[in-house]
Amino acid sequence: MPTSEIDEIEVPQVVNLSNVNVDNVRAELVRASHAAIRKLEAEEADVNGIIVGTATTGRFSGRRAAIGAINAQQADVREAFVGGVRGESISINGTTAMMVANSINATEAKAAIVAGAQINAQNIRTGLLIGRNINGNVHTLVDGRAALVAGVLGGLIAGLVMLAGKVLFGRKK
């Protein structure tokens, strides 16, 4: 019986998109404007005025975009709403739920969670900030000390509730 070989799909080098809705895009370089992409995979992506579900790239550049998640070596995002961004180096100006990177540059950003080794910020507002070297104007809702106190108090209250439950509703011999 002859074995069937699956032909390998060749990835195009450059894809340019404008005013379209696409499920999946995979290429070396993707340029898109005024489009919606569910899943973007590229070595480099440059998007403007776009909606993206997930983007996995080596280098991502986006302006005026709404993005679910970005996983990139380098990401430069301006005037955007991002669910989560993860990478080696992130430069952001916009709103994000979570950003995690080795190096973060945030000129004007709002985020729920920011975690990075080197964080440089002109003006950033965040709920929780985790970092080694932090420079700039950062406003946090929860800092390290407040998180520690909240954890200790939460653990203490949970322990007391469990102890009371065991005393009140425990088995009697």
Image (spheres, rainbow, N blue to C red):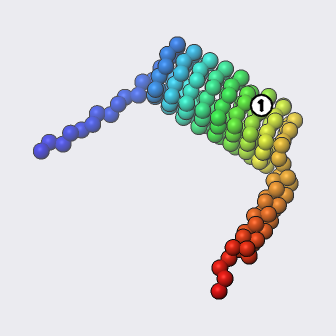
SS state under label 1? strand
Residue at the image position 62 percent from the left and 18 percent from the top: 49
Q: Name the image quarter holding the C terminus.
A: bottom right
Seen from the viewer's position, the closer of residues 92 and 140 is: 140
At a point 66% along the width and 82% down the height, the residue shown is 172
Q: In which quarter of the image is the N terminus?
A: top left
In front: 94, or 102? 94
Q: In this view, does 100 lie to the left or right of 9?
A: right
Q: Which quarter of the figure has residue 79? A: top right
Kindly identify the amino acid type of the residue bearing the numbered disc 1: Ala
Q: Which residue lies furthest to the top in this view?
A: 19
Whether residue 156 appears in this view of the structure is yes
* 14 sits left or right of 80 in the view: left
Q: How far across and how far down the image is residue 65, in percent?
A: 64, 23
* Figure quadrant of residue 64: top right
* Residue found 84% across the figure and 48% down from its top: 143
Q: Dot 1 corresponds to which residue?
A: 109
Above or below, 127 relative to 172: above
Name of the residue lying farthest toward the left = 1
In this orientation, which residue lies closer to the viewer: 145 or 7? Answer: 145
Q: Which residue lies furthest to the bottom in this view?
A: 173
